[in-house]
Image (cartoon, helix red, strand yellow):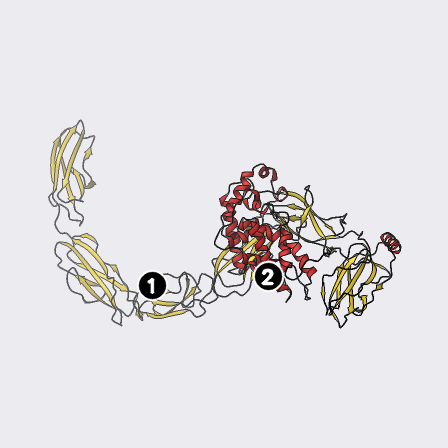
Amino acid sequence: MDVVEERPWTDEDLAALYDRFFGPLFDVAVRVLGSEGEAGSAVGRTFSHAFAELRQRPVEELRPWLYGLLASELPRKSSARASERYAQIDPDRLANPAAVVRDDRIAGAVWAAASDFAVDDFLLLDLQLRHGLRDLELGHALGLDLRVVDRRLERLRDRLEEAVESPVSPVAVFAALAPVAPPVGLKERVWASLTEPTAPPSKRQRRAVALPRKPVVVAALIALLAAAATAGAFYAVRGKGVHDPTSVHSTSHSVERGSADPDVEVAWSPSPDASGYSVSWSTEPETPDKAVDLPGAATGTTGHLKPGTSWFNLRTLGKNGRWTSTVHLGPFLILPDTVVPETSITAGPKKYGTGIATFEFESNEQNAMLECRLDQAQFETCASPKTYTGLARGKHSFRVRAVDGAGNTDPTPASREWEVDVKAPATKLTEAPDDFSRGGDRFEFTSSEKHSSFECKLDDGEYEACASPKTYPALDDGEHRFHVRALDRAGNHDASPASRKWTVDTNPPETAIEKGPPHVSHKATATFTLSSEAGASFECRLDDHGWGECGQVSGLTDGKHVMRARARDRAGNVDPSPASWSWRIDLPPDTSITHGPSGATSSTSAAFRFSSNDTAATFQCKLDDRSWSSCSSGKTYTGLPQGSHTFRVRARDPAGSNDPSPAARTWKVDTVAPNTTVTSASVAGKTATFSFSSSETGSTFECRLDGAAWQACSSPASYGGLKHGHHVFRVRAIDAAGNRDATPAVRAIKV
């Protein structure tokens, strides 16, 4: 940044400003306008405006201010105009110069693509890449918000990259387009147009020579003192005349000693009859011409002298129109500058850097010219800051040296060696909160490259330096997003930062029991319906039991019961005031039959004994389809008809609750004996075989041969070892009720 001191700008200051900035401003203007003449006029108008402002007030950030003045002189709706003469490449500014320098088509294509941008966009890109203005300076120059500058530059770079296919980044090619030098004489013609109205040319050339101040060099001092003595140094001749000024002297130098300061200030007391002065500086005393250089009220002037001896010559024009004799003051001895300047690098990559490197540097001599060199290239004129783009991976070196106005060159250029790393590190989150948390969130992260540093960002904030672990102890409730990116030693950022999205919830949930058993329940089970915020889980507690899972409750006993339920949200917050449900269990009595018939029976009577778990209960009995009636254990039924019968009994407690599941017993009365039939008989030798059946399914049988006793048997029944002669076989069926066939079946055989 150029800062103008709060002092009036002299003509010499304005001339130095013009000399420094004419070339860069012309380069911008001619690329937009396409005409050298129009570009020169635009630059002239810019300096005219600048000079008028600077004579009235100091201006900070001089460089962006001048570019902004030029921008206001350029058209806004048209595009930049392409020209092949502008498409020249400076190989030192490219990562792969050989590939591009041999292909002029790439350079031409890049310039053609850039020239299609609107002027505002072209200026934004050109002033950053080719003229080194930073984002803040660009905003000041073009009147743009810093955020707008950043977004537009990113968009323009992307457009340029998409427009041209090139082995080297088109952005790097554009940055390397050579500046356009003004045609011979244009700079001088524009200057003349600026100075003509206020400074008409005189017969003598009084142009200042820019020589910075230096310490005295002994050898040069001796030589110049000797030359001055030969020329008759150290005397002043004051001419005679009625209008001579008085007290002509130097306020900065002594004519009796040499000085390395080339700026000699002369002062005098004006004559009351003076209407103007003619002044000159010369190597020997002389008489100035009759051009009026200074008004009659002038009290001094300053000369910027070359090394050697010089005289100041002054004569006065009186109000009567006559010139006085000449006053000579001198000689002034200006020593030559033989002290070399020193150069220092104030900013730039040190050990590691990215593919873009920007250096800032300075000299201990304010007006010294600076020359830069990258790697093995030649030194070239440069200005701070100096930016190199598209640098290849590997080691690089940068050197800068100052050259003062006397041509002295710093023999020990300032240098910086560094290594370019174009590969960005990858960032990984190793610990992060769950989707929901109760605050006090902690993140741990790593980088794929050793010695990386990190930058963290929370929500819509800015990235800030951070270290693992990173903790946020008290975030507001709600959704948050954390980003972290690794930054390697070269300054490469991870382009895809690791991130985590989660919700902080410090408020406990509310629990409600929407539905449960009635106030008095006759069931040993209970089911509850619970509700809370979305995603919550529940814990339940019955009576004095511990907290556990919620679900249907069974095996409940008579008496009062309390169910408590509490919700736990997704962040782990637990409802501190659980919901509760109270009810009473009154279970009905249970009935059981302890004695009574079952299955089939031949008895037409039935007696039943029964009991209940409630010792105070009474009973009701029911046979088949009859109605319930009071009864007691030992209930007997007689004269039962043939067929199936069902007996039911239920207990009834003192509160009037009946057993909802009465005990039951089913049996069958069967008094009819089955009928037995011999279906076949056969004799083989001394063995006889008989087959038989019953009229009732499920019957068993008893058999008897001749006079033997009845024995259980099944069909077919065989008898062996029989004696010769006649034999009689008898068989009778016995049904499930125990009824025997009173008329067994008989079959006689002969062996």
Classify 10 Å Cα crowding around label 1: few (below 14), some (14-19), many (20 and above).
few
The percent position of residue 511, horizontal first and vertical second, equals 40, 67
In the picture, the quarter occupied by the C terminus is top left
Query: Any mark on residue 527, and which?
Result: 1
Amino acid type at mark 1: Thr
In the image, is residue 20 above or below residue 709? below
Q: Quadrant of residue 654?
A: bottom left
Residue 432 seen anywhere in this rendered image of the structure: no
User: Element at badge 1?
Assistant: loop
* Residue closest to the far top: 685
Which of the two residues, 167 or 176, is positioned nearer the viewer here? 176
Which of the two residues, 130 or 512, is positioned nearer the viewer here? 130
Which of the two residues, 98 or 596, is positioned nearer the viewer here? 98
Q: Are marks 1 and 2 in contact (CB under 8 Å)?
A: no
Which of the two residues, 714 or 330, is positioned nearer the viewer here? 330
Query: Any mark on residue 220, and which?
Result: none
